[in-house]
Image (cartoon, rainbow, N blue to C red):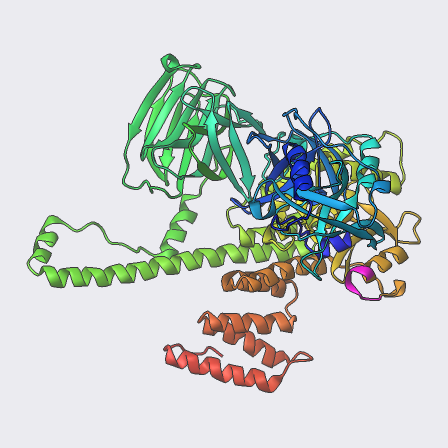
Amino acid sequence: MLFLKQVGFLCLFAFSQKNENSGIVENINLQVRPSIVVLKTVGRNEGREALGTGFYISKDGLIATNYHVIGEGKKVIIESFDGKSVEATEIVHIDRENDLAVIRGSIKPDKWLELATNKDARSGVPIVAVGNPQGLKHSVVSGVLSGKREIDGREMLQLAIPIEPGNSGGPIVNSDSKVLGVVTIKSLVTENLGFAVPVDSLSKLLTQKPISVSMKAWATIGALDDSLWDQIFEGKWRQRAGKIFGEGNGNGFGGRSLLISKKKVPENSYEVECWVKLDDETGAAGIVFGSDSQNRQYGFYPSNSQMRLTHFKGPDVYSWQVLKQESFEFYSKLDWNHLRVVVLGKMFNCYLNGKLVYEVQTDESVVGSVGLARFRGTKAQFKGFKFGKLQDQDPKTIQNIKNAIGELFSNSPQNETVESLVRKPELAKKAIDGEIKIQLEKINKLKSLKEEIAQKEILSSLNKLAKEKNANLVEAALWISKMEHPEIHVAEYMEVYQGMEKSLKTMLPAQKVTAEKKIEILNKFFFAEKGFHGSIHDYYSKSNSCMSEVLDDREGIPITLSIVYMQLARSLGVSMEGFGFPGHFMVGFKPDGELWKIVDVYDEGKVFSLNDALRKIKELSGKVLEAEDVKPATDREILVRVLTNLSNISQREKDDISVVRFLSGILELDPDSFVERSTRALVLSRMGRFEKALNDVNYLLDNEPEGLNVEKMREFKIFIENQMKKTGMEANE
């Protein structure tokens, strides 16, 4: 599997090679092509489809392909030879080591391929491959089977045919149109060289007990948690990084599609709020409340750039009433708008962007569920959805905050003032433009102040958790996620995590069990039931280091998966620690109180002895470690490693703002990290934030950490001070 990851799973076939026996190849092609399917998956990067190939191997619709083609956690679309397109319904078999998978769709094929045996795979035999190179569907290429090679401890078929991206998972067939192997990897040495998994590996997989995982359980990327939401009237709903996305036509009246929260709504009085953004102002989407989770509910939402308040009493137009509908100048078209409804028994108030727009008195108490709604196939985004008891607000505190910020704008000018300005229109307009510039600068300063306050809240919470003896690392990692996604609510994600803890504990038997048994139970829960898995296609995506998205998608890299796994293990009473090995994070426990057992969460929870784990680290990174050198990582070290991953990705993306955020997180946990402080000073200087850069430089010069080039740092300080003089700033020593 290591070799497959190292080559990036590149594969698939070109169709330009000529063959002396073109008639035979043409005949094989005609027989094989109807069995070939195009497989499409959509991962975290919205709009980016990954293409691969599969082929029918049975009359009941079984399709063989590569494991890496379907990936874990992704929805799979099957496109047959005649152009029909359906979603895969089931994952029947997977073999990660041999990069094989067998899936099922709802289409029953007219033709399918028979499997040969390894005896038929002789060196020099003619072979044909049919696939979808570079998206060129059902292309054919011919060549010969060069031989058999051992790669990564496994036998592989070496192919003398050109390979291109786009057709992984395609079959290699012989002159009888029987499958000899499944294409899996491209050689990095020459273009006309590839490899395939021998057919015997596929035959063996088919004899094993099916895992039979439904796509609903498999496709965790963007999937909503069924324990939290009810999806009513169809339509498509998914979540990404604290946001909920809705699209597709619902089958309720008016194309209605509902997403109803399963959480209990407070009695008598409560409030519900969210932000909503429409991609088309002719659409409609927003809040529903007082719902029976079917046809009855109130709705408050933008529709055609107006704010509509409706009451649905049944399934059709005769039971639907528009209570109010008006336009408001403070509604932001094609942008985020904040909706809030306050329910007080038999009355409720509706707010748009903080301003009261509707007051309604009803004949009966407004009771029922709350949630989100879309109409007429509208594409909409939602964030910050929450509800609960009315929050008490301290008017004095609010006023103090307003006073601290200051009044930015004066009252609207009186008529006589306007008349006086008209006498000198050009001067007046010029003066107003100047005032606008001043006010915009104030607004930008307020935005910066708001962001700084938010970041200080995050750093303070992170530092506080890191100091706690038994801190919840999932919660700490969620605060790190909030640096990247300010709109997420840590408390809401913690509810999701705590729900997992609760469900996991119900799986423990009544009698006392060993730590090994608890790990066995945890593995079943974590991987099989909850679908957590290691990221392959998007390994270096920020999503894999943001705990909110790891919990959303059940996909991550070794350290983020390990944090969730380790915290769950601790909830079962297993004393588990993290190990920051070079290039690979794992966790460990001591079942006998003496020797460490190491668990590789990224590799489906495989358990190793410490020595075996060190051998694996040597294979992965080339680093040689001795058992006596291995020590568990502290909570701070684990969090710093997550922040370092995010900082490194941000630096590669040239996102200086994010780099500063993550470096600030590292320095909050480890103030003496002089490399990170030096880097932050450099980035701040590049951004023109010279005063803050100078603070970091002075800190380094005052403390002179080991390894610091003091002379270079002094030169850097002079440079910053010169830049400050040019911009009219003064250094605060």
State whether residue 604 appears in this view.
no
Residue 563 spot, x, y in % from top left: 72, 49
Residue at left offset 87%, top offset 41%: 119
**Residue 194 sits above or below residue 244 on the image:** below
Residue at left offset 82%, top offset 30%: 209
Task: Write down the quadrant of residue 57 in the picture.
Answer: top right
Lateral position of residue 150 relative to residue 174, left or right: right
Looking at the image, which residue sits at the far top?
A: 318
Residue 5 is a magenta residue: no
Residue 620 is a magenta residue: yes
Identify the magenta region.
619-624
Residue 134 spot, x, y in % from top left: 57, 48
Residue at left offset 47%, top offset 25%: 250
Residue 631 spot, x, y in % from top left: 82, 61
Residue at left offset 52%, top offset 64%: 654
Q: Nearer the viewer, residue 460 or 259?
A: 259
